Image: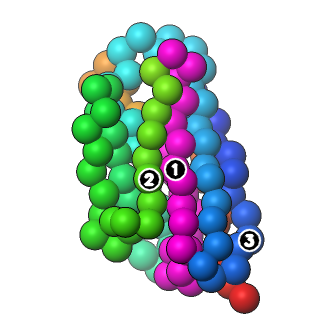
Amino acid sequence: VQLQASGGGLVQPGGSLRLSCAASGSFFSISSMGWYRQAPGNQRELVADISRVGNTNYADSVKGRFTISRNNIKNMEFLQMNSLKPEDTAVYYCHVVWNGLDVWGQGTQVTVSS
């Protein structure tokens, strides 16, 4: 399976962005889907993930501002990011667990700055 992320960009503080990630290839065994981010000098961290049946988990820093969702028919996942802060600036990576294996998409840059 391959992942293609899109939707990053430059946004002012308080603004919104929506990230998308499309899975292609053999994807019948995708279970968890999620988003991670990595800021310069920091380790990659979990932002949010969602199970196949829709159970969600969020980092404390994004609770109430970000919403993760998925479309199991189209094999896509989304991250709606509202009330963005400068500290949300990072490269965002989509991730799935496929046949028990971790699969990563290429990163998409999100920059929150005035």
Q: Amino acid at mark 3?
A: Leu
Disc nearer the start of the sequence (3/2):
3
Work out how far the residue at label 2 is from the one at label 1, CA to CA, in angstroms: 6 Å
Residue that label 1 marks: 79
Nearer-the-camera pick, 19 or 16: 16
The 10 Å Cα crowd at callout 1, few under 14, some 14 to 19, many 20 or more, is: many
Tags 3 and 1 touching, CB below 8 Å: no
* Mark 2–mark 1 CB contact (< 8 Å): yes
Q: Which residues are magenta?
A: 73-94
Q: Which residue is mark 2?
A: 67
Along the viewing direction, whichever of 24 and 18 lies nearer the viewer: 18
Element type where label 1 sits in the image: strand
**Residue 80 appears at what percent x and percent y?**
54, 54
Magenta stretch encompasses residue 87: yes
Which residue position holds label 3? Answer: 10
Residue 104: x and y in percent read 48, 40
